[in-house]
Image: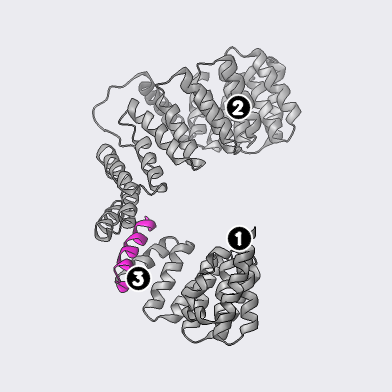
Amino acid sequence: MVLYLLHIGFTYMDADDFLDEEVQSNVQRWEKMLRNKTNEYFEAETLEEICDYYIRKEKLKKALEVLYYADTLYQNYICFMIQKAEVFLALNKFDDAHSVLEKAELYEPNNDEVALIKGELLLNSDDAEGAIECFEKALMYTNDRMDMLFEIAYVYEEANKVIEAAHYFEIIIEEFPDEEQAYHELANCYDLTGDADKSINVINKLIDIDPYSTSAWYSLGVTYTRIELYEKAIDAFDFCLAIDDDFVAARFNKANALVELERFEEAIQEYQTTIERDGPDSVTFCNLAGCLERLDKNQEAREYYKKATKINPNIAEAWFGIGLTYDKEGMIKEALQFVKRAVVLEPENTEYLLVLGEAEYKLNNLEQAIECYQEIIAIDPLMAEAWLDWSYILFVENKRNEAISILDEGMRLLVDNHLLYYRMACYLYACGKNKQAQEMLEKGLILNFDEHHLIFETLPQLQLIPEIKTIIALYKDNNEKF
């Protein structure tokens, strides 16, 4: 994620700043009263603001204290009832919330906020029909229909009822076609349901309304990226940047899309521009380094990985990247310490553990290497690379029966993985178990004929065995027929 650079300097205070100062002052006065254990008079509006302050800070018990005190000064005040219901709802005290709302309805049966909160309460209680009735009532009596439609949609979103939320965003777009936020929210709902086509259609409607909406082009690029249409994503980000060349997030995500297309030189340029415009950032440095690494510019990549760690010492990917660059240069001892540091930061990252296991083995630390593979299998038993590497180092160490046993364990879990069958065929041939080896070879050929060459990479001498050539030729003919 790109972090936007905040330019700190002298700023003029607006009305909200003074309002915040006044609220802070009232909160301090309230807390001083509690400390002194005295009773003071507060205007109703002031108590509402203090309560809202605690709700925003998620200090709900303190908010309740304010509301109970407010009851002693202002009995049956509808605003306090609404706030109390909201707090009870947030605390999952549904019965208490229901009691307060019932009382509020007696005083103001047509209050739209009461109806909205009651609808949310019923939704949380799995009473969908009752919730809808309350929401419709809220819409009937509200003075601001658009805001109420948004509120209802957000309630559904918080309840993870995305389809229902989308329905209300659709209503907003139908009734208020210039309300840009509704398009973004609706597109997000479709993204969450996995319907990218609908999401793209909604964003394109917004672009038709406002072709210069940077947020719309950006959202379109993000959606295309999510469904791996990287060329289209880049086009969308380019439109965004054509409108606003300083839209850093668009440039960063364009670079990421270029990486997916292996257009590393172009991606590097975009990452560098991102750093120039947005300032140093550990993630951007790390991504840039990854591009350089893919271009085998290991020393340059390492420098950028190190820059990333200086900004954020806890960025495991950068420490791992440093280790990889050393590993590529054959400097295994140097690589080991950096990969270990990455593993400390992310102990369940199986990719890091896999590389660590390989490095340990290269340094003749067989026991430590095996420990790495055991950890990987404990975390992810379906990681084929771990079974293959673990068994292979045992095979190379002439512990062939152990290698077969380990790989057999993996095959029980990965019954359709051709790589394991091909590897097992090699181990069995090396042990003189030719019939069993041929069975494994045939299963591998059935699952994936095209990668049968892998057996020759493991055991080159298998190319000289006539029956292997015969079996492969037979399956080649069958494969071509189909």
The quadrant in which residue 337 appears is bottom left
Q: CA distance from mark 3 to mark 2?
A: 51 Å
The quadrant in which residue 131 appears is top right
Q: Which structural element holds mark 2?
A: helix
Tell which tag, 3 or 1, sits nearer the viewer: 1
The residue wearing badge 1 is 480
Q: Which structural element holds mark 1?
A: helix
Image quarter hosting the C terminus: bottom right
Earlier sequence position, callout 3 versus callout 2: 2
Q: Magenta residues, as a range?
A: 315-333
Please give the label number shown on residue 153: 2
Q: Which structural element holds mark 3?
A: helix
Q: Nearer the viewer, residue 328 or 476?
A: 476
Tag count: 3
| Residue at 72% from the left image edge and 18% from the top image edge | 106
Badge 3 crowding class, 10 Å Cα cut-off, few under 14, some 14 to 19, many 20 or more, is: many
Is residue 122 shown left or right of residue 288?
right
Tell which tag, 3 or 2, sits nearer the viewer: 3
